[in-house]
Image (spheres, rainbow, N blue to C red):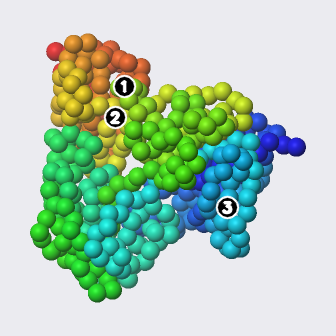
Amino acid sequence: MAKRLVVVGGVAGGTSAAAKAKRTNPQWEVVIFEKGPYVSYGGCGLPYYVEGEIEKKEDLVVRWPRQFREQGIEVYTQSEVKVLDIDKGEVEVFHSEEGETRRYPYDALVIATGAKPLVPPFPGKDLGGIHVLRTPNQGEAIRKELESGKVKRAVVVGGGFIGVEMCEALAPWGVDVTVVELLDQILPPMDRDMADLVAKYLQEKGVRILTGHGVEGFLGDRRVKKVVAGGEEIPADMVILSIGVRPNVDLAKEAGIQLGPTGAIAASERMETNVGVVYTAGDCAEARHIITGEPVYIPLGTTANKMGRVAGTNAVGGDAVFKGVLGTVIFKAMELGGAMTGLTEKDAVRRGIPYKVARITARDRAHYYPGGQRITVKLVYHAETGKLLGGQIVGHWTSVKRIDAVAVALYAGLTVEDFSRQDLAYAPPFSPVWDPLLVAANRAVK
């Protein structure tokens, strides 16, 4: 009788694990249980669907259940795993469309339960017009309200990466946007000087930004009419809650699966949990930071896919490792883009690492080539060894993908002097003779 791998959760981590497991060992039976209606979709594309850049929510679907079945993977959607019975090696699943609960045995298990949006118990949080954005159906609900033409003022609660992307998503609908952020800057993972470049740009585009404003509640009848934050009442026809996420680990915790210091599921570099045949992947799992070696929780689609491939490989008898993350992030806000990887200046301060900074502003194309824009590059490096620790970029959205070169340099453990010698591509439409990354690295060497 064939062995069975059960994957709890789809989307990025779960589907990657299932697909890789089936390719690694086709003799295994592979089953995915996903509580939602879609097993595999591009969640990072949701703001662009709300914006209207992506026409239909179905366009976000990466793979349909039939495509997995053609590969020999069984998929159950609208099927929520309610119990992980580690002692018996079984999962208890509620199939909502049938209204039935059934048990399924497994020989190996991958927990890919993802993350939950953080929604504090604000007074009035259940009023109409208040949304989170994690699934295609949630995106559809937001877009339908925008299409009605009745939304004139929107408040985005949370000025992180998704919150900033929502400013772009709402702009084409002619909506006045206010961003409310509890901390003293938007984009909290970035250094203040780089985040302020983005804030200034958004304000020039008409976005109101209120930092240091904690939300106290929402006012309205059946629908939201005002957001109370920092003692101010802000008119709102729509609210987007973008405060962040937390790992969805309730099932794992109840089953005795060990959590790490971040609150996510602890895992080895093989994505093994503390239970031998149980693996984990995606936004429910923590990772190791490549530079510091610390356990971190940085939920990203790229990370989830990599974790999934490793978990799926090992669950069916293969051999793979996941070395960790640098926290490489890129985002677009209208015509501006931002990106970061590795440690920031404030990360170095927090950890007591002796550091220096090289920060430059330059052109992203040859000065004579039309359409060039200003780009700001910030490199953080070790004060004693010169080893590169991190980088941040803010500029036109077409130019900030340069962050990938910094990420590769960090993974390779290069010093700023090593980095300054890299043979980066040059042509006038793409960069000056001295790419801004090299200009920053040369600044550091000097």
From the top left corner, tell me how far across and down residue 293 is, in percent. Answer: 39, 26
Q: Which residue is mark 1?
A: 291
Quadrant in the picture for the C terminus = top left
Viewer-side residue, 270 vs 363: 270
Q: Is residue 64 visible?
A: no
Mark 1: secondary structure: loop
Q: Amino acid at mark 3?
A: Val
Viewer-side residue, 446 vs 288: 288
For mark 3, does the 10 Å Cα neighbourhood hold few (<14), some (14 to 19), or many (20 or more) residues? Answer: many
For mark 1, does the 10 Å Cα neighbourhood hold few (<14), some (14 to 19), or many (20 or more) residues? Answer: some
- The answer to which image quadrant residue 64 occupies is bottom right
From the top left corner, tell me how far across and down residue 304 is, in percent. Answer: 51, 43
Mark 3: secondary structure: strand
Q: CA distance from mark 3 to mark 2?
A: 39 Å
Please indicate whether residue 33 sits to the left or right of residue 226 in the image. Answer: right
Comes first in the chain, label 3 or label 2: 3
Viewer-side residue, 260 vs 144: 260
Marks 3,2: beta carbons within 8 A: no
Residue at the bottom extreme? 221
Q: Which residue is mark 2?
A: 341
Which residue sits at x=61%, y=60%? Answer: 82
Q: Which residue is mark 3?
A: 93
Comes first in the chain, label 3 or label 1: 3
Q: Amino acid at mark 1?
A: Ile
Q: CA distance from mark 1 to mark 2?
A: 11 Å
Q: Choose mark 3 or mark 2, whichever is in front.
A: 3
Q: Amino acid at mark 2?
A: Thr
Q: Choose mark 3 or mark 1, whichever is in front.
A: 3
